[in-house]
Image: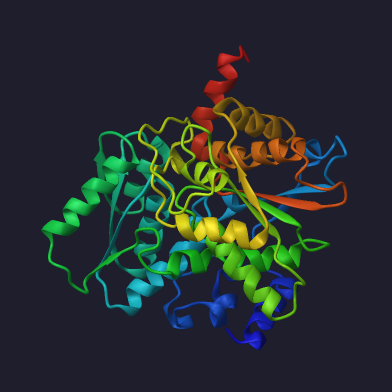
């Protein structure tokens, strides 16, 4: 990556008055500018969350709200690039296994590119995601069970169909395109924060976000825009935390969770495709891991909503992670800490509302 390209894209973040999608990042992305399938993804805000820093143990906590992307999730950045890769490969159709968010985004971006799409979705995926996959014109296979069952059905379908250039997989880490789309978050954070972020807490399933962030921050350090890499922390719900277990035990490769059990189905990934890359990124940046309980993540999300900051239950994993890490003394009183909300709160509104109802609210 040429430092001049990195600086150009960083400058685009600091000077652009309106979002043009990922087009401004074309010089640092692995597909040609003409192939990018963009709408207005990216340029999402950072929002101050004073309720998470009021005890004085951490300086500033900000939420990078990826729920404000066009379909409501960070996957839009990924699909702008990945579907662009499909276009360059001459594909007629894209397909993938997904917990839901990626399927909705893939259907939308494939439709924009004039491609067919097919998603393999576990039955526990939210109604909103399943509905919007169809609304965007995508074909959907709802598989009884959890993500592992949907992945198995996807693998079976691929085994029964001869490989051809007309079908292109968007499965996580099948190519580098998806996490290369995610790395644009690092550029925006460097441009949006008054001082460079000291740490970023990311709700982690397969690991696309963490791997994208470390790639982006590396480029910014190489171009001398940042002095050092922010510490990266992977947050996983305690009921499905294979990377947390592996990092704390010093085990590589990570193990597989035999019986995953968390309310946060979007990142209930028992065997993360990018696990080893995530563990390497955490070590490289001096970061770590955190595993909040379902109660903690739901409470964090609803508490932020009560302060006028809507985040998804998935975002609540990272918000709760900030609180747990703060209590553990991971942050200094003058540090700036970011947590990423990867999806709009409305996608998981039923989960959040059910939590309040159990409390009698």
- Give the percent coordinates (x, y) of residue 265: 44, 37
Considering only vertical position in the picture, is 65 above or below 122? below
Q: How is the image coloured?
A: rainbow
Left or right: 71 as drawn, with respect to 301: left
- Give the percent coordinates (x, y) of residue 278: 52, 57
- Give the percent coordinates (x, y) of residue 236: 54, 41
- Give the percent coordinates (x, y) of residue 18: 67, 68
- Of residue 170 and residue 17, the one placed in the foreground of this image is 170
Left or right: 77 as drawn, with respect to 339: left
Q: Residue furthest top?
A: 360
Residue at the (46%, 43%) spot, across then down: 242
- Of residue 135 and residue 346, the one placed in the foreground of this image is 346
Considering only vertical position in the picture, is 359 above or below 55? above
Residue at the (55%, 25%) spot, across then down: 353
- Of residue 24 and residue 153, the one placed in the foreground of this image is 153
- Using the rendered view, name the quadrant where residue 270 is placed: top left
Q: Quadrant of the C terminus?
A: top right
Count how many numbered circles sit on residues in the image.
Answer: 0
Q: Is residue 46 visible?
A: yes
Q: Quadrant of the N terminus?
A: bottom right
Residue at the (82%, 52%) spot, across then down: 335
Q: Is residue 41 visible?
A: no
Residue at the (41%, 45%) spot, across then down: 255
């Amino acid at each position: 990556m040429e430092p001049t390209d990195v600086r150009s894209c960083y400058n685009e973040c600091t000077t652009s008055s309106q979002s043009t999608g990922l087009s401004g990042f074309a010089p640092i992305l692995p597909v040609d500018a003409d192939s990018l399938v963009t709408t207005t993804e990216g340029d999402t805000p950072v929002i101050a969350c004073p309720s998470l820093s009021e005890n004085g143990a951490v300086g500033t906590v900000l939420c990078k709200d990826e729920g404000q992307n066009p379909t409501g999730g960070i996957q839009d950045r990924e699909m702008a690039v990945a579907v662009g890769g499909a276009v360059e490969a001459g594909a007629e159709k894209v397909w993938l296994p997904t917990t839901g968010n990626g399927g909705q985004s893939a259907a939308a971006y494939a439709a924009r590119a004039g491609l067919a799409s097919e998603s393999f979705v576990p039955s526990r995926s939210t109604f909103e995601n399943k509905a919007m996959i169809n609304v965007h014109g995508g074909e959907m296979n709802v598989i009884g069970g959890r993500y592992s069952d949907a992945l198995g059905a996807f693998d079976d379908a691929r085994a029964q169909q001869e490989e051809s250039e007309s079908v292109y997989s968007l499965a996580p880490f099948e190519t580098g395109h998806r996490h290369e789309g995610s790395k644009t978050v690092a550029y925006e954070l460097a441009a949006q924060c008054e001082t460079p972020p000291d740490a970023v807490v990311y709700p982690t399933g397969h690991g696309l976000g963490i791997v994208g962030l470390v790639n982006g921050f590396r480029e910014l350090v190489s171009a001398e825009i940042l002095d050092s890499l922010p510490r990266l922390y992977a947050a996983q719900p305690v009921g499905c935390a294979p990377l947390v277990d592996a990092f704390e035990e010093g085990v590589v490769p990570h193990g597989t969770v035999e019986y995953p059990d968390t309310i946060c189905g979007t990142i209930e990934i028992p065997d993360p495709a990018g696990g080893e890359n995530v563990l390497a990124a955490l070590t490289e940046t001096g970061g770590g891991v955190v595993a909040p309980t379902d109660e903690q993540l739901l409470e964090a999300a609803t508490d932020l909503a009560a302060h006028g900051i809507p985040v998804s239950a998935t975002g609540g994993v990272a918000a709760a992670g900030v609180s747990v890490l703060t209590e553990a003394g991971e942050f200094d009183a003058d540090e700036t800490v970011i947590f990423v909300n990867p999806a709009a709160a409305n996608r998981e509104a039923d989960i959040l509302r059910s939590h309040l109802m159990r409390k009698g609210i």
